[in-house]
Image (tube, rainbow, N blue to C red):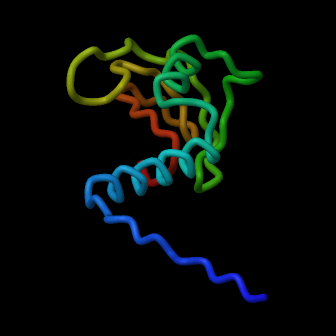
Amino acid sequence: MVVRRRAIRREENPGEREGAEMLRRDVAFSRRSVLTEQDVQTLWELQAFRSRVFLTEEGVRAEVFFPGFRARIAGPDFRAAVIRMGGAVRVGGVEVHLTPSG
């Protein structure tokens, strides 16, 4: 005895397809990081790290003296931060991102 199943074709809704794609992208992003950019900004503001000394992507030593004032308007996330990099003390804005590409 042969049983044949008849495929039921469902009409596709373009909006549904786009929504599913957005959901897949969100799920993929959430697997990469459990922190949000705001979480990382709060960690920076409170300097909630084991050390105040970091290495840049180029391997330059960076020491944070003051994380800066959190900005509430457009521009860098923090203003007037004081950081020593490569022996020079720098004062300026700090932009916080979850990924190197921003």
Name of the residue lying farthest toward the front: 1
Residue 13 rendering spot, x and y as whole percentages: 28, 59
The image shows residue 14, relative to residue 33, as above or below, that is below
Tell me the quarter of the picture where residue 40 sits: top right
Tell me the quarter of the picture where residue 91 sits: top left
Name of the residue lying farthest toward the left: 74
- In screen coordinates, is 55 left or right of 76? right
Tell me the quarter of the picture where residue 4 sits: bottom right
The image shows residue 26, relative to residue 80, as above or below, that is below
Residue 17 rendering spot, x and y as whole percentages: 35, 59
Q: Quadrant of the N terminus?
A: bottom right
Q: Residue at x 68, y 30 (%)?
A: 53
Q: Residue at x 51, y 15 (%)?
A: 45
- In screen coordinates, is 46 left or right of 48? left
* Nearest the eye: 78 or 66: 78
* Nearest the eye: 7 or 51: 7
Q: Residue at x 70, y 21 (%)?
A: 49
The image shows residue 13, relative to residue 98, as above or below, that is below
- In screen coordinates, is 37 left or right of 5? left
Residue 51 rendering spot, x and y as whole percentages: 73, 24
Residue 35 rendering spot, x and y as whole percentages: 59, 30
Q: Residue at x 50, y 53 (%)?
A: 24
Count the numbered circles shown. 0
